[in-house]
Image (tube, rainbow, N blue to C red):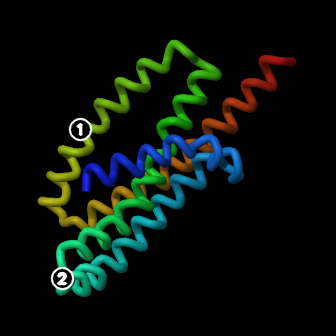
């Protein structure tokens, strides 16, 4: 699962310029797609798991791949987008972004386990969907702020 996630997140990272350049709102579209896909997965998980329980290991692995791959691909988009924004506007902040990303990755992994054990996996996924939607909205504000700042700087 981890290898699959890393592979497809890497594909999302490589595809980021193409994807965020084609869709209005850039990373907002990816973040909202992640949130909606997580909510969809929450709705279909019980049926998928019940159906897949009778399958052989190979088919179970393919079902797992089908669930993980789209989410991982989309989750590979926001960080490279943010790095490209920083690289264009605030190069000294790029190492800080890497540090924050590393810290958040470790803390969120531990926190996710604790939240899932305390409140359940379903509630954890609802929280994740909400956080991705919030991050998407923040990306719109960031782009708007950067454009406004660029206009005021050039005039």
Question: Residue visible at 51% across and 13% down?
Answer: 92
Label 1 belongs to which residue? 107
Callout 1: few (<14), some (14-19), or many (20+) C-alpha neighbours within 10 Å? Answer: few
Instruction: Tell me which numbered mark, 2 or 1, is placed earlier along the sequence.
Output: 2
Tag 2's secondary structure? loop
Q: Quadrant of the N terminus?
A: bottom left
Q: Can residue 105 be spotted in the picture? A: yes
Name the spot of residue 30 as percent of width and height, x first.
55, 53
Question: Residue visible at 44% across and 61% down?
Answer: 70
Question: Residue visible at 70% across and 50% down?
Answer: 22
Question: Residue visible at 58% across and 47% down?
Answer: 27
Give left or right: position of 27 versus 41: right
Callout 2: few (<14), some (14-19), or many (20+) C-alpha neighbours within 10 Å? Answer: few
How many numbered dots are placed on residues in this image? 2
Label 2 belongs to which residue? 53
* Residue situated in front as seen by the camera: 135 or 72: 72
Name the spot of residue 135 as percent of width and height, x first.
49, 46
Name the spot of residue 109 as percent of width and height, x first.
23, 45
């Amino acid at each position: 699962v981890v290898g699959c996630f890393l592979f497809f997140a890497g594909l999302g990272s490589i595809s980021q310029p193409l994807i965020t350049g084609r869709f209005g709102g850039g990373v907002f579209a990816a973040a909202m797609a992640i949130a909606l896909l997580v909510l969809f997965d929450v709705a279909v998980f019980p049926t998928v798991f019940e159906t897949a329980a009778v399958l052989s290991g190979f088919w179970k692995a393919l079902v797992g791949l089908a669930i993980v791959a789209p989410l991982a691909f989309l989750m590979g988009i926001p960080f490279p987008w943010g790095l490209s924004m920083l690289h264009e506007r605030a190069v000294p902040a790029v190492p800080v972004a890497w540090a924050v990303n590393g810290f958040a990755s470790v803390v969120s992994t531990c926190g996710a386990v604790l939240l899932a054990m305390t409140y359940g996996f379903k509630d954890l996924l609802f929280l994740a969907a909400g956080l991705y939607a919030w991050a998407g909205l923040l990306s719109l504000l960031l782009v708007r702020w950067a454009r406004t700042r660029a206009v005021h700087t050039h005039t």
